[in-house]
Amino acid sequence: MTRLPLVIGMGGINAAGRTSFHQGFRRIVIDKLNAQARQETFVGLASLMNLVTNQEAGLTDADGNVINPADIESIFGQQILDGTLIRKIEKNHFDPDATHWHQKMNITPTDKIITFELRARDLPNPVPSSWIITELADKKVSVEIPEELTVMHDTYRDNPIKAAGQLPTGFEPAELYNSRYQPRGLQATIFAATDAIRSTGLEWDAILDKISPDEVGTYSASIAGQVNDEGLGGLLKSRLQGSRVSTKQLALGLNSMTTDFINAYVTGNVGKTFTSTGACATFLYNLQTAVNDIQAGRIRVAVVGSTEAAITPEIVEGFGNMSALANEEGLKRLDGTDTADHRRTSRPFGQNCGFTIGEGAQFVVLMDDALVLEMGAKVLASVADVFINADGYKKSITAPGPGNYITMAKSVALAEQVLGKEALQKRSFILAHGSSTPQNRVTESLIYHNIAECFNIENWPVAAPKAFVGHTLGPASGDQMAMALGIFSHNIMPGITTIDAVADDVYDQHLNIATEHWDCPDMDIAFINSKGFGGNNATATIFSPKVSLTMMEKRYGAEAMATYQQKLTSVEQARQVYCDNANNGQFDLIYKFGEGLIDEEQITLTHDALSFAEFKNGITLPNQNPFADMV
């Protein structure tokens, strides 16, 4: 019997806001929400962006004035909308109008000698042999150089790329816990993993009491590692900028650190730890391994995700020089204007000129169906499978290839086998990779077109999160997962509102690529599709909570499900407490630095098992020969 991996929690942060309880999704479709949901969304974003704080008297502004939640939109509404989703790069990242760099200058002496003074301590060591040094007063020296001198001069340039999908203005994860000068991506990881775990409504220790401690897994990665100054970014440029490399930059810069931080500071995990990178499909790469481990019974609970905080001048220039990012001139040409629209730089399946980089962290908590039943966990979705295929031989490593045909076809065929033709043809939708490049809009739409024809699907809904939050690289398919869960919950299909019309070269005959948000019926199936640089293709088949619960009832029976519903009541209450607290800016981040350390002297080892003082249950050692028929 194959165990069903169920999504029982999802949390994170991107340009749309907090992920749990579909807050980020609600920001994207804000104009389609009812009055109560709209108010909750504005209150949650106002708290997240530090526009209001929660005091004993209620929500207050920066001057201490108490504000009625119903008035948040009228007071801060436009500021909240302007400070979320894709927008001009803010100066906490870098100034796109005056981006710092070093101009190389070759200075030639006019009178045969270049002469200047400086402090003796600032002389290079060793001093070049051609330099003539004369000691002066006050520990200074005179330097005479009888040849050409090459120097790097501090200067600034106008960056041709000015927009990104940034975390909401005013949100600083470092301020929510003792972040100890950690890279921004790891700060976001602590926030996102906490958000996902707390959104379950279950205490982590209560979960561990039900299982062996090695039946937990953490699966996560960043593509580029931590490229901010506190990580690899600072490591690579510190000496060239005249600074010292810190003791933390190398260790904290590694792409596995998101996994390591969750194990060490959030969950205390001693079970499986796993890091896999697959370019833009990284979230799905890690999800596939977690799903396979749950299906095989190797683990019962998984924290899965990805984090990227790569809005730096170096990363932006790297993608920009590949002609991959939408730049000012390209956007102006598309619109026939003298001013680029920084809110509409990402235009999947429309007339576009490149993708828009984003930052974010997305995590899900998975649990097998038997444990969900036992604990009464809330079911948000289930993951039937994740398919990954490469492209084969290529001329250009960044060009698309046939791998995505395979992943999409397998995912669609599986959905048809499990739920039937009607569910596939009438109640499924696609969360497209939708990178917003001219090449992607053609190649990706052609895949959907051909699969729709093969499986007799008409008017197949296609949504594209990157239109709103940009391309977050590693977590991009996590953004797609968050949107899928939002669609299941709210019955709203996000249109691609950043385009005026679908481009003429898009194969949309069988597709429904809307330019406005629209109310959709109950959906059963979501296909999360990712086409990554280098031939990293992945597609996940996701079933709605309604379908997932129906499948569970068929396996366990109506009586077991009735008992489950009773347990779910108290879990829902705990979930609502966290939702209310988070909307008021009370996140209570889990960061157990130096807490709960395992006493290795208290470990008990027998021939059959390991036991720990800190865990209720022990770890059983292998007690059967899996190769008995071969030896």
Image (cartoon, rainbow, N blue to C red):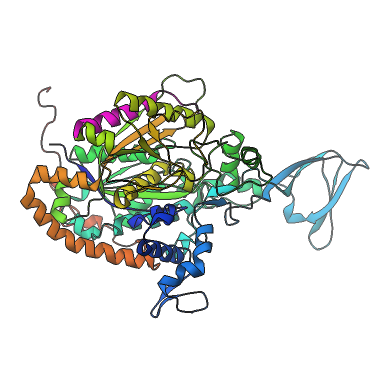
Q: Is 605 situated left or right of 231 in this image? A: left
Location of residue 297 (image quadrant) = top left
Q: Is 33 situated left or right of 438 in this image? A: left
Q: Position of residue 334 (x, y in %)?
A: 61, 38
Main SS of the magenta segment? helix
Q: Is residue 406 visible?
A: no
Q: Position of residue 535 (x, y in %)?
A: 43, 28
Q: Which residues are magenta?
A: 398-418
Say which residue appears at 84% left-offset and 51% top-offset.
Answer: 116
Location of residue 577 (image quadrant) = bottom left
Q: Is residue 598 visible?
A: yes
Image quadrant holding the N terminus, namely top left
Please, is residue 432 above or below residue 248 in the view? above
Does 412 appear in magenta? yes
Q: Position of residue 112 (x, y in %)?
A: 92, 40
Farthest-out residue, right: 111
Q: Is 185 situated left or right of 204 in this image? A: right
Say which residue appears at 35% left-offset and 45% top-offset.
Answer: 481
Does 363 appear in magenta? no
Camera-side residue of 198 and 242 = 198
